[in-house]
């Protein structure tokens, strides 16, 4: 394996590691165990959204609702917690509601052939609206008690449980994506829906499944958001989470037209976003530059992905 | 239009002459245009406003008191539009929490020409009939002074969470805090960053600060909205030493003062402010002469023990301090100081 | 939304051309919506109010017309709202440093075009997803706006600069005839020039257009530049409207524009739609969202309603199209 090939195929790893070294040189505290573990916890909601989004994007669609939906599910959990004083019913409600929402989006996209972009955009607005309407008088709800403490800050072997949950889900997704017919079907749909249909894939069912999974991931992200926050309120910046998650996937090298991309790449993309967010704060970079930086990084990643794809095409010929 | 404004003017004049008796069909219509509706503070504000409208309407049956509350959701364009349409509808009193004061100068003139009393909220305006202000600098200073007095004289590291860059209220509070802190040598600001009134951002900031500055002694914020996630993060990481200095008088935050890590807060309280608007409008309607700049009374909140300790450490004795129980009472019942009872 | 549903089945049976029918339905809905709000608000029909309403949707008109061009090619432009803030920032900074309003106008429009051109090059030349590219410039342009404003607003008092957005002739804001002129100019561009044919061709089928010797990728660059330029123009109107430059202006404007354009009958897959539809879409959507704002509707309820309108419109579109196919 020559260096050129590594740079080409593992560029995100190289970039992430180089960034780590630079941040370390500027602020040695960056690589401290405490800071790393803080990052590992911060990226969980973004990571969950990115994971769900990954399958949607690979299949050639987009789910804009995930950020606001996770805020809504966090609020929903809080409302049930406020009503019942426990988490059991709330967790069940979040799982059911998130699967239902994803399923509905999937049906609208797959069966009625509505554009995913618009369907999920309207879901975004509805989730935003509902998050403010389901909570009594729009107040904040504090989430006290064993479950939130446990899921939010419990560590196993020094690693946050919530982070392990993300990694576990990624591992499961990896197996499904790389070693099952479902994974192959998702890639086939992303490459060409017609061909996938000809190959005997039940395109509609796979699509609905993908959106149910992205819905579920929003639900999980909402739960993780609430356990990390220790309280919920409407009006949280869900779209910021979504933007970060999409950026992570693009940076991770997922070709946006669909049909390509690896879970490993997406994970590195998530790590990169988490590290950069953390470092920008740690280095006291003025807030106004954060947005500029993200925009430039996404554009650059799009450009690099394109160049790599071009060179691969010419290599293939 | 003209007819309506003359009537309104007539009503105001009538009230001014003390002839409240003729008021069978006397009406007081209050509109409050706010900059947003996302923070818990906004919500408390609205509920106080609505409760007060209902209570005043009931307490004074000879005046039909009505109120409406509009939110511009952070958009200046939306706010200007809401204001223009409201002027067109001709209420008696308008409270406007202007996102940008200068953009509203022409509208103030327009409203006054239509016989509407304009009350500028938070950011004072010379042209407005009245300004409802919070004393952000003084409040910030009190928070800073409290920090000095409770820091114990040892070197003390504090990190400050700011509002959205450029927001006048947030910047005034920030300036005040720095002024208060400058009263002592030992308190050292190790970091300041805007969290844009966003609790998720605040949480990430708190998390990063706690790892970046292992010796951090306190987190100060220009809103209690930042305190919720910061307290949660500190609790999650088992940090029981760090102190919190809040601003807003949110009830759940003040509840964590007695025996907790929240050392000081500034008692605004949304509920209370909403009540205050209505009593102010009512008093104007009754022809009372108010100060042109109505400075909302916003005391510092400390526990009794901490107040005693602070006084020993040179905290100025002339700063009014509410103790937690009293502050909680006032915050929960916005009318306690100003309700219909106190007006009658 | 109930009214749309009831109007439509009768309409689907009639064999009028789809778009004309849609415009009639839209016009009907505009009347319905205004009647509804005038019942809720006695002042709704006053001339003053109509002026206020039209002025408040002037920017949405401009941006939506640009979005129509983009969506006719099957693309999307998420950057316009941020671009309004960015272009306004560049214009206002130029004005305050040079004191020249014309120079301020020029730089505002050029700045808007610059962002648009970046979009166009990535989308047209590199054939990247319009959604992703403009999502990146959505973040980038907002960030740049925050940087150049240093996150604070800048007051503007230059009467020339404020004229377009701030002045009224009686109850008619000058920006309304201006929007109409832009509409006429863009209509000529779209329906009477080779460029306009390229817009439809690029949307109908990129490859066929290419085979026919057209250069859709070059047109695509210009189409996004046009959308950017209209954002620049909107920036000037916005600054005039609020007599200051605001780093957060135009927030989520793109979503309103997309909804209005879809409402106006432009297909999301490109190739079908007209500017007139967009005008009607903006009017209807503008009446609804402004009506909600002005009646003090809970903002969360407003979001819910926005989402339901958007979903309702695409559902309706798919339904009518299926009806046609059957």
Image (cartoon, coloured by chain):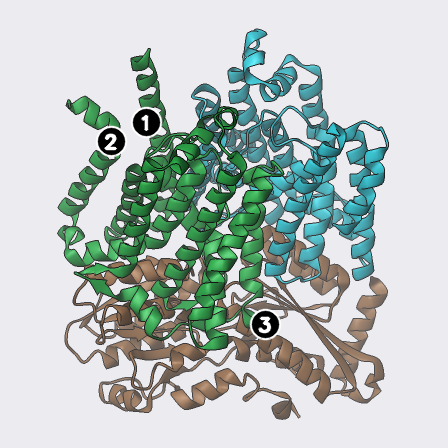
Chain colours: A green, B brown, C cyan
Secondary structure at badge 1 equals helix
Q: How many marks?
A: 3
Q: CA distance from mark 2 to mark 3?
A: 52 Å
Give the residue number, with chain letter if any, for mark 2. Answer: A11
Dot 2 or dot 1, earlier in sequence: 2
- The answer to whether residue C287 is left or right of residue B159 is right
Where does residue C248 sit, x and y in percent of width and height?
A: 50, 48
* Vertical arrangement, residue B317 with respect to residue B193, above or below: below
| Mark 2 in CB contact with mark 1 (< 8 angstroms) | yes
Question: Which tag is nearer the camera, tag 3 or tag 1?
Answer: 1
Q: Residue at x 74, y 38 (%)?
A: C280
| Mark 2 in CB contact with mark 3 (< 8 angstroms) | no
Secondary structure at badge 3 equals helix
Tell me the crowding category of disc 3: few under 14, some 14 to 19, or many 20 or more residues within 10 angstroms, Cα based: many
Tell me the crowding category of disc 1: few under 14, some 14 to 19, or many 20 or more residues within 10 angstroms, Cα based: some
Tell me the crowding category of disc 2: few under 14, some 14 to 19, or many 20 or more residues within 10 angstroms, Cα based: many
Where does residue A93 sit, x and y in percent of width and height?
A: 49, 64
* Vertical arrangement, residue B175 with respect to residue B267, above or below: above
Q: CA distance from mark 2 to mark 1?
A: 9 Å
Give the residue number, with chain letter if any, for mark 3. Answer: B46
- The answer to whether residue A128 is left or right of residue C43 is left
The chain that hosts pointer 2 is A
Secondary structure at badge 2 equals helix
| Mark 3 in CB contact with mark 1 (< 8 angstroms) | no
The chain that hosts pointer 1 is A
Q: CA distance from mark 3 to mark 1?
A: 50 Å
Please identify the residue farthest to the front as the structure is shown: A200
Where does residue B84 sit, x and y in percent of width and height?
A: 70, 56
Give the residue number, with chain letter if any, for mark 1. Answer: A304
Q: Residue at x 55, y 63 (%)?
A: A132
* Vertical arrangement, residue C131 with respect to residue C294, above or below: above
Q: Residue at x 58, y 37 (%)?
A: A115
């Amino acid at each position: 394996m020559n260096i050129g090939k590594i740079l080409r195929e593992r560029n995100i790893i190289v970039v992430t590691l180089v960034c780590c070294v630079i941040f370390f040189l500027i602020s040695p505290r960056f690589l401290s165990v405490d800071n790393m573990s803080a990052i590992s916890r911060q990226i969980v909601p973004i990571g969950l959204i990115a994971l769900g989004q990954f399958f949607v994007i690979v299949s050639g669609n987009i789910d804009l609702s995930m950020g606001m939906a996770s805020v809504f599910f966090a609020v929903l959990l809080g409302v049930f917690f406020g009503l019942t004083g426990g988490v059991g019913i709330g967790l069940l409600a979040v799982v059911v509601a998130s699967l239902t929402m994803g399923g509905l989006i999937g049906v609208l996209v797959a069966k009625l052939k509505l554009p995913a972009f618009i369907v999920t955009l309207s879901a975004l607005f509805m989730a935003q609206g509902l998050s403010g309407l389901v909570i009594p008088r729009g107040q904040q709800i504090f989430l006290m008690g064993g479950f939130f403490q446990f899921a939010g800050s419990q560590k196993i072997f020094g690693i946050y449980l919530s982070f392990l949950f993300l990694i576990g889900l990624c591992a499961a997704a990896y197996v499904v994506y790389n070693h099952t017919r479902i994974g192959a079907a998702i890639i086939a749909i992303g490459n060409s829906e017609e061909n996938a249909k000809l190959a005997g894939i039940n395109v509609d069912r796979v699509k609905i499944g993908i959106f149910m999974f992205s819905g579920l991931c929003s639900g999980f992200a909402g739960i993780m958001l609430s356990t990390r926050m220790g309280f919920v309120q409407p009006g949280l910046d869900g779209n910021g989470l979504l933007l970060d998650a999409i950026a992570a996937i693009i940076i991770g090298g997922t070709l946006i037209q669909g049909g390509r991309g690896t879970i490993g790449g997406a994970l590195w993309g998530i790590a990169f976003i988490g590290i950069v967010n953390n470092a920008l704060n740690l280095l006291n970079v003025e807030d106004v530059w954060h947005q500029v930086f993200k925009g430039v990084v996404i554009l650059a990643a799009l450009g690099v992905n394109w160049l790599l794809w071009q060179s691969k095409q010419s290599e293939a010929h | 239009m003209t007819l309506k404004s003359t009537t309104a003017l007539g009503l105001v004049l009538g009230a001014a002459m003390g002839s409240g008796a003729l008021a069978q069909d006397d009406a007081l219509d209050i509109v409050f245009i706010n900059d947003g509706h996302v923070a818990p503070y906004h919500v408390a504000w609205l509920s106080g406003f609505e409760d007060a409208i209902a209570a005043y309407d009931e307490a004074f049956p000879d005046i039909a008191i009505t109120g409406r509350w509009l939110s511009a959701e952070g958009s200046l364009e939306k706010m200007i539009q809401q204001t223009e349409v409201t002027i067109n509808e001709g209420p008696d009193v308008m409270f406007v929490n202007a996102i940008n004061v200068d953009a509203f100068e022409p509208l103030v003139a327009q409203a006054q020409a239509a016989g509407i009393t304009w009350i500028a909220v938070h950011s004072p305006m010379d042209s407005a009939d009245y300004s409802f202000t919070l004393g952000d600098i003084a409040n910030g200073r009190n928070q800073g002074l409290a920090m000095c007095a409770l820091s114990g004289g040892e070197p003390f590291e504090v990190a400050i969470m700011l509002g959205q860059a450029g927001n006048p209220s947030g910047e005034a509070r920030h300036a005040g805090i720095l002024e208060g802190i400058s009263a002592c040598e030992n308190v050292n600001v190790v970091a300041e960053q805007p969290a844009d009134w966003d609790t998720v951002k605040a949480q990430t900031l708190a998390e990063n600060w706690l790892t970046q500055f292992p010796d951090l002694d306190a987190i100060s914020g220009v809103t209690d909205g930042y305190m919720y996630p910061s307290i949660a993060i500190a609790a999650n990481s088992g940090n029981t030493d760090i102190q919190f200095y809040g601003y807003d008088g949110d009830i759940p935050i003040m509840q964590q003062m007695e025996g907790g890590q929240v050392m000081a807060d500034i008692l605004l309280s949304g509920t209370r402010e909403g009540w205050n608007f209505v009593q102010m409008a009512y008093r104007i309607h009754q022809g009372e002469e108010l100060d042109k700049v109505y400075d909302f009374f916003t005391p510092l909140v400390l526990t009794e023990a901490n107040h005693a300790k602070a006084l020993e450490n040179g905290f100025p004795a002339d700063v009014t301090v509410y103790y937690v129980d009293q502050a909680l009472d006032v915050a929960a019942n916005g009318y306690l100081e100003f309700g219909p009872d106190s007006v009658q | 939304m109930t009214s749309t549903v009831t109007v439509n089945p009768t309409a689907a049976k009639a064999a009028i051309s789809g778009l004309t029918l849609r415009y009639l339905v839209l016009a009907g809905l505009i009347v319905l919506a205004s009647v509804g709000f005038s019942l809720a608000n006695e002042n709704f029909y006053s001339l003053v109010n109509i002026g206020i309403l039209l002025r408040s949707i002037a920017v949405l008109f401009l941006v939506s017309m640009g979005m129509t061009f983009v969506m006719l090619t099957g693309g999307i432009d998420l950057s316009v709202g941020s671009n309004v803030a960015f272009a306004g920032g560049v214009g206002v900074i130029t004005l305050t440093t040079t004191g020249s309003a014309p120079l301020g106008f020029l730089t505002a429009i050029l700045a808007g075009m610059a962002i648009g051109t970046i979009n166009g090059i990535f989308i047209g030349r590199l054939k990247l997803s319009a959604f992703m590219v403009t999502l990146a410039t959505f973040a980038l342009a907002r960030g740049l706006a925050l940087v150049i404003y240093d996150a604070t607003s800048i007051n503007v008092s230059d009467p020339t600069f404020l004229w377009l957005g701030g002045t009224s002739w009686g109850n008619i804001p000058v920006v309304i005839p201006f929007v109409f002129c832009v509409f006429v100019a863009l209509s000529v561009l779209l329906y009477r020039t080779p460029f306009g044919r390229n817009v439809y061709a690029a949307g109908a089928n990129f490859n066929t257009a290419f085979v026919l010797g057209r250069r859709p990728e070059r047109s695509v660059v210009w189409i996004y530049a046009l959308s950017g330029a209209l954002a620049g123009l909107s920036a000037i109107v916005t600054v005039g409207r609020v007599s200051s430059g605001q780093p957060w202006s135009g927030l989520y404007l793109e979503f309103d524009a997309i909804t209005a354009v879809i409402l106006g009958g432009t297909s999301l897959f490109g190739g079908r739609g007209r500017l007139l539809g967009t005008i009607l879409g903006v009017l209807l959507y503008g009446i609804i969202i402004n009506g909600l704002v002005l009646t003090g509707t809970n903002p969360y309820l407003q979001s819910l309603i926005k989402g339901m309108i958007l979903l309702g419109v695409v559902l309706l579109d798919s339904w009518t199209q299926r009806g046609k196919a059957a």
